[in-house]
Image (cartoon, coloured by chain):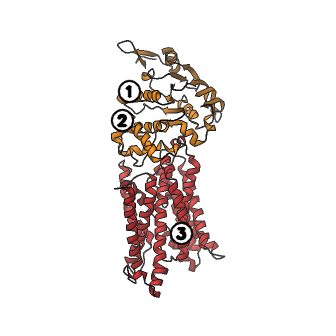
Amino acid sequence: MKLWLWFGVLVILWALVFFLSLGSGYTELNFGDIWRQDSLTQTVVGEVRLPRALLATLLGGGLALAGGGIQGVFRNPLADPALIGISGGAALFAAIYIVFVSQTGFSLLGLSGSAFFGGLIATLLVLVIGGRQPDLSTILLAGIAINAICIAGVGLMSYLAPDQTLRSVSFWALGSFNHVGWAEVSVGLLVIPAMIRLISLSLVLDVLLLGDQEAAHLGVSVIPRRIEVILWSALITGISVSLVGIIAFVGLIVPHLVRMTFSAKHVVVLPFSAIIGGGLLVAADLFSRSLLAPVELPVGIVTTLLGAPVFVILVARWSKGLWL
Amino acid sequence: MLVLDQVGLEIKGRSILKDVRLELALGQHLAIMGPNGAGKSTLLGLIAGDSEVTSGCLTVFGKPPRAFLPLERAQRIAALSQSSELRFPFTVEEVIGLGRFPFKAKPVDAAIIVREVMNAFQLNAFAQRSMLSLSGGERQRVHLARAVAQIWSSPVPALLLLDEPFAALDIAHQVVLRRLLAEVLATQPVSIVSVVHDLAQATQGYDQVCLLTEQGDQLAFGSPSAVLTATHLSELYGITISEMRFADGTPAGFGASPAAP
């Protein structure tokens, strides 16, 4: 079957999950009901569920695509924005912003910018520790160290935080769509240009996989392109963390699935990861608010519970010499 | 097309290459030989434009390689490093296709060239195989095919740089590859520069040889029959090396006798 047909199937699957998510919850609505114009439906669907499902699509798609990009640029199929410390750095800087800056004037964009900056610093540290030819273990070890420091920092921030901000700080470690409205969606739209630029770099990412020297011999300006991919991925991760906290494993698992099922070429991996990641995060959010309804689980817990076992399987296969 | 005049390279005050002079015409195959650590791969890298020479003059197609824009250079100089590692499940066809990256051609045109190269390398049966399922020698062959795809049917003269292309190949595949490189030279407007390690095969298929000493000095440059002599090689490696001959008397490369001091 042609790849674009598969892509169509995945878009339909995403749409199914999306509309299921609009209808499900404390107020159950079927497919016909969600279009009604009464005030209850407009509030429940228009003000609560629609922005939530849209943001989950944008961020799930963005995170999965950024994961694919990061794996390509590190030449490492087990890299993930959360595992190698980008998300931790973003969460720490978001928490610092909340505690120290938000009393004088809070803006979502400022928060996102701060998180982006934190993610970038964490990535640069990983690059410095990992060296120029980062192999699997140095990246993961550097990521573990940086994550530990960042999570400790988030803990420190929540200790320093005045009571009313305490909850908003602690949620960064868990990840949640609970508070999402249209303001968050409008900031979340910023991931789209980053995603488009990363997809346009697909061929360059393919060539980078061959090695720095090989890529240079094929005419790629290796260092500027690598920095560019890291910047766009850190932007996506930073926006995502600032809006909904750390959501781990989406960026790790989804590109893997695409490579195993369809193709390893980035021109396939990146867009397919985006649509699957978008659908997956909408589903994970739906699951997190239906499982113990009316209590909501943080969605980051759901993705971690789903993703960690898959990660264990991948590591086990890797230790047997199978990369995928 | 390739001229090196008194080329030298110093890195952090340490001399890596000294006074290398050679000249290569279109359609010729140059072998760079010498002991471990002689700077053979470094010399190949200088020609590929990886770094700047610190003395002398190196020109490819009339220009220093680093004076080309990266994409321009990649359209005329293809280089294969010693090890290319790829941990992602690309197919053989996709990897060879990456060789066409510098050209930004329509996918159909690139596909034709990829197909021709796969034919030449007898990789058709492998086209859809994942790189991860291949043996080391097979992978080497695919990466070589990728480098050849980069200069295949070039409208202008091109240069193919190979770092130990025979390293991971068994003797049968070495013979096949030798024939293939000869065919590339005969049918395409290219020259080839190879770093070669194996003295047993040193006399086969090269038009020019450049011998480097352990200090990166050029010991000799010229035709294989002039450069590759038992005297030169014994001096170079510091052991007694003799020329071997097949039963019919044709040269069979060089070897060290077991009793060599």
Residue B175, disc:
1
Q: Is residue A88 visible?
A: no
Spatial CA distance of label 2 from label 1 is 14 Å
Relative to residue A1, is residue B214 depicted above or below? Answer: above
The chain to which mark 1 is attached is: B
- Which chain is orange in the rendering? B
Mark 3 → mark 1, Cα distance in angstroms: 59 Å
Mark 3: few/some/many CA within 10 Å (<14, 14-19, 20+)? many
- Answer yes or no: are tags 2 and 1 on the same subunit: yes
**Farthest bottom residue in view:** A39
2 and 3 marks in contact (CB < 8 Å): no
Q: Position of residue B40 (x, y in %)?
A: 53, 29
What amino acid is at disc 1?
A: Val
Type of residue at label 2? Gln
User: Do the residues marked 3 and 1 share a common chain?
Assistant: no
Residue wearing tag 3: A188
The x and y percentages for residue B162 are 49, 32
Q: Helix, strand, or loop for circle 3?
A: helix
- Give the residue displayed 52% in from the left and 46% down from the top: B104
**Nearest the camera: A188 or B43?**
A188
Label disc, if present, on residue B122 of the rendered structure: 2
Query: Is residue B141 rendered to the left or right of residue A108?
Result: left
Chain identifier matching the red colour in the rendered picture = A
x and y percent of residue B64 in the render?
Answer: 63, 34
Label 1 SS: helix
How far from the left and from the top, in percent, is residue B192? 50, 29
Residue A172 in the image: above or below residue B21: below
Q: What residue lies at 45% left-to-right and 20% top-to-bottom?
A: B203
Q: Which mark is residue B238?
A: none
Q: Residues within 10 Å of mark 2 (few under 14, many from 20)?
A: some
The chain holding disc 3 is A
